[in-house]
Amino acid sequence: MKITQIRYYGGARDKIARLGLAHLFLELQQIVLDTPVYMLEEKDANGGAIVRECIDEGFINAKDWDAKKTGDVDWIKRARYNQTIISRIGVELQVSARSDLVVRDLVHLRNQLQKGDLDVGVLIVPSDHMQVFLPDRTPSFRDAVRYIEEEFKEAQTYPIVILAIEHDGPGPALRKRTRKS
């Protein structure tokens, strides 16, 4: 995949540098960049759940990323010095649900930041271009920025980074999940 845009809030860029999180932040970006995703470039033609599974697989294969349960931050990694945890980065992936769930992800990040369980939070969303090829209510970078800057302004005060991702190019349609009755 590609990373097309990055937006920093609440001193996130400085915290990444000052707290020794640059290595983890680069590792996170490498996981995204190493995840191949090709999709049919037609409006609403692809399912987002497959994109999510591909990115999750990258975190699973990377060393020491902890997956969290529903209702918490998706992925967390801790920077250590000897046996001491010196800083933590958390990641929320929002590529396969309704755009208004971005606010839930921001709340998860905020809560973990307030408790001191994270030092920086990262929200990964589809780019505005890629979102067109996913179901119509899937969030985009533009949606995430709007939620932070207009609807949930408190989020601007927390060290949060938004990463916009994009598929690698045209390919077959990614199957959509169907709900079982």
Image: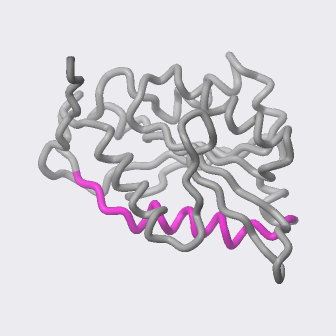
55 lies left or right of 148: left
Which residue does the image show at 38% across and 46% down from the upper left? Answer: 52
| Prevailing secondary structure of the magenta residues | helix
Where does the C terminus fall, quadrant-wise? Answer: top left
Give whichever of 100, 67 is nearer the camera.
67
Across and down, in percent, residue 107 comes to: 69, 29
Figure check: 113 above or below 55: above
The furthest residue to the bottom = 82
Figure check: 46 above or below 159: above
The stretch of residues the image draws in magenta is 19-38
Residue 66: quarter of image? bottom right
Give whichever of 60, 122 is nearer the camera.
60
136 lies left or right of 159: left
The colouring scheme, among rainbow, by chain, secondary structure or one colour, is: one colour
26 lies left or right of 121: left
Give whichever of 45, 107 is nearer the camera.
107
Across and down, in percent, residue 122 comes to: 64, 48
Across and down, in percent, residue 105 comes to: 61, 33
Please check the rendered image and state whether residue 37 is part of the magenta-colored stretch, yes or no.
yes
Residue 112: quarter of image? top right
Give whichever of 180, 174 is nearer the camera.
180
